[in-house]
Image (tube, coloured by chain):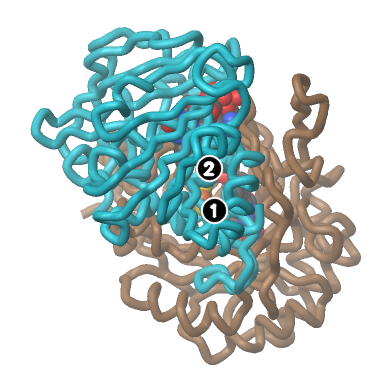
Amino acid sequence: MRDMSVSIAGVTLKNPVMTASGTFGSGQEYSEFVSLDRLGAVVTKGVANVPWEGNKTPRIAETACGMINAIGLQNPGIDVFIERDIPFLKKFDTKIIVNVCGRSIEDYCEVVERLADQPVDLLEINVSCPNVKEGGIAFGQKPEALYEITKRVKACASQPVIMKLSPNVTDIRVMARAAEEGGADCISLINTITGMKIDIERQTFALANRTGGLSGPAIKPVAVRMVYEASHAVSIPVIGMGGISCWQDAVEFMMAGATAVSVGTANFNNPYVTEEIIDGIEAFMERKGLSDIREIIGAVR
Amino acid sequence: MKNQEICEILRQNEIADGIFDMTLKTYRIAGAALAGQFVSIYLNDRSRLLPRPISICEADPGRSTLRLVYRVTGPETGTDILSTYEPGTRIHVTGPLGNGFPIDDLQNKRVFLIGGGIGIPPLLETAKRLHGTVIPVLGYRSGPFLENEFGKYGETYLASEDGSCGVKGNVLDCIRQNDLHADAILACGPRPMLRALKEYALSENIPCWISMEERMACGIGACLACVCKTTGRDEHSNVFNTRICKDGPVFLSTEVEL
Ligand SMILES: Cc1cc2nc3c(=O)[nH]c(=O)nc-3n(C[C@H](O)[C@H](O)[C@H](O)COP(=O)(O)OP(=O)(O)OC[C@H]3O[C@@H](n4cnc5c(N)ncnc54)[C@H](O)[C@@H]3O)c2cc1C
Ligand SMILES: Cc1cc2nc3c(=O)[nH]c(=O)nc-3n(C[C@H](O)[C@H](O)[C@H](O)COP(=O)(O)O)c2cc1C
Ligand code: FES
């Protein structure tokens, strides 16, 4: 038996493969394709203290080996989330990671406090969404602001806190350290890279929001580099993501320094991809004679 | 469990300028399909990640086949690539997806099936399944396609913008000029047509179901890419937005903002 389990802030995941926030809802829809019991964790769509309408459509556009999105964090609000989505996820043998968004520090804290008595394993704080006007990325682009929100969220959180970092910064190491100094238990990266697409026939922006976040294989090399840099800058664990679409990609992120990985856009192309990645990593371990997955974490220095 | 199937293309040919008619071998989707549902088609090209949503034109569980009719939207687009696939090519298909037209509520009624352009194909399976009086009213920009196949199910009326077939004008011009009446409308086509039909249905005081279109990423209700505005608070989203791929694509016209 090969040990695929990894540990993040004292929470043990049966394997390092989880979903990326916003691409997997709260698991309900994809549970018709994959068995959620097999996943290391399900990371839910960002949830705020009150319902958010999100942006106008078109909200997405396809690009070469990727896509841009500006969903605008549409979500039903924490009340519905607690009533409907957490009980659904509780039926499965997987860890629950709730992605939290807000427009102010108070908003984030309100959600985090509401989750205190909920059966949630980890919190992922999204300070890196490029698609909303207030909040979101504003906290994720200045080290002082990131330090401040991390500290405030940590002070009111009952579960360990993952700070989700934006790649839209000059030096990811500075941001990773700011999160660690603020008390983060873990960091995850990368969120999407701000992009734009123009429809030349209609002579207009492809997205109603004009700009959107680029995701998918197109961003993978950038993400691997940032995961490598961030994991060397801090001593807390790093969750890697950005364009992972097969087991080879997942192993690459882990060798770069990720303790676990999130799979996002690839689900849209192949709804079975998360399970296939878990199987692929296991076969790789077997082929390489690895008994413990931790042997590959940060193996390339 | 929902499934993705790897389907073999049995036939594919161009039935009108830029309009392709493709038949797929499918063991599961054909049997499960409802009229007005759609499938997600994936290209065998790893640089294009997102599925193309295409309506089910006909489903034949007996022969295990699915028929899709689609328009190539331009050079180098995904549909352009799809149109070059030879019979024997295998493609990934997810479905059937979405809700479909409310066939059971409309049996033995007089029903308008109103299609505009590439919105016409899903009405064919719908016509086949409705037992009552179906009145297909099909609008084209120019030359027609599929019109003869609707003739089997009811007297079919055509309209075209350039007058090359049927009434010169749009589907509503066609309905008025022929003095047609029905108890309900099922429609699929461009937004302006749907908007006009919503108005018409209100003035006639008849229910109107419309099939909506939006850009999709997951196609199954998880990503919230494909929403449209609703007149009331949506039960799932808890805001005034509903998912076209999951809660639609068919909505009562009074439930959505057009
Ligand atoms: C529920 C539903 C049913 C549909 N049924 C049919 C049908 O039966 N026949 C048919 O010809 N067309 C149908 N369409 C429209 C069809 O999905 C688009 O024309 C097609 O996706 C365009 O892809 P492309 O590869 O040509 O364009 P590209 O420019 O290569 O597409 C890039 C991306 O944009 C998306 N996209 C582009 N245009 C549209 C559009 N109008 N609607 C939604 N997504 C779009 C593509 O899916 C792809 O993800 C349907 C759309 C929906 C939402
Ligand atoms: C449609 C879509 C919605 C997303 N929504 C969120 C979100 O709500 N919160 C968040 O932190 N990240 C969100 N993301 C970012 C992803 O979680 C992930 O960081 C990014 O897409 C890179 O990974 P990928 O290339 O595997 O998709 C979203 C991404 C996509 C494509
Ligand atoms: S396309 Fe993802 S919710 Fe409809």
User: Dot 1, how many residues are within 10 Å of its Cα: few (below 14), some (14-19), or many (20+)?
Assistant: many
User: Dot 2, how many residues are within 10 Å of its Cα: few (below 14), some (14-19), or many (20+)?
Assistant: many
Residue A239 in the image, given as x and y percentages of width and height: 57, 55
Identify residue type, mark 1: Cys
Residue A273 in the image, given as x and y percentages of width and height: 38, 43
- Residue underneath mark 2: B217
Q: Is residue B183 left or right of residue A226?
A: left
Q: Residue furthest left?
A: B62
Q: Is residue B23 left or right of residue A151?
A: left
Using the image, determine if residue A132 lies above or below residue B49.
below
Ligand 3 within 8 Å of the CB at mark 2: yes
Gap between marks 2 and 1 measured at Cα: 7 Å
The chain containing the residue under callout 2 comes to: B
- Residue underneath mark 1: B223
The disc label shown at residue B25, or none: none
Q: Are marks 2 and 1 in contact (CB under 8 Å)?
A: yes
The chain containing the residue under callout 1 comes to: B
Q: Chain B appears in which tint? A: cyan
Identify the secondary structure beneath mark 2: loop
Using the image, determine if residue A83 lies above or below residue B40.
below
Res. A262 visible in picture:
no
Q: Residue at x 50, y 49 (%)?
A: B210
- Kindly indicate which chain is depicted in brown in the rendered structure: A
Q: Residue at x 51, y 52 (%)?
A: B244
Q: Quadrant of residue B67?
A: top left
Residue B89 in the image, given as x and y percentages of width and height: 28, 14
Ligand 3 within 8 Å of the CB at mark 1: yes
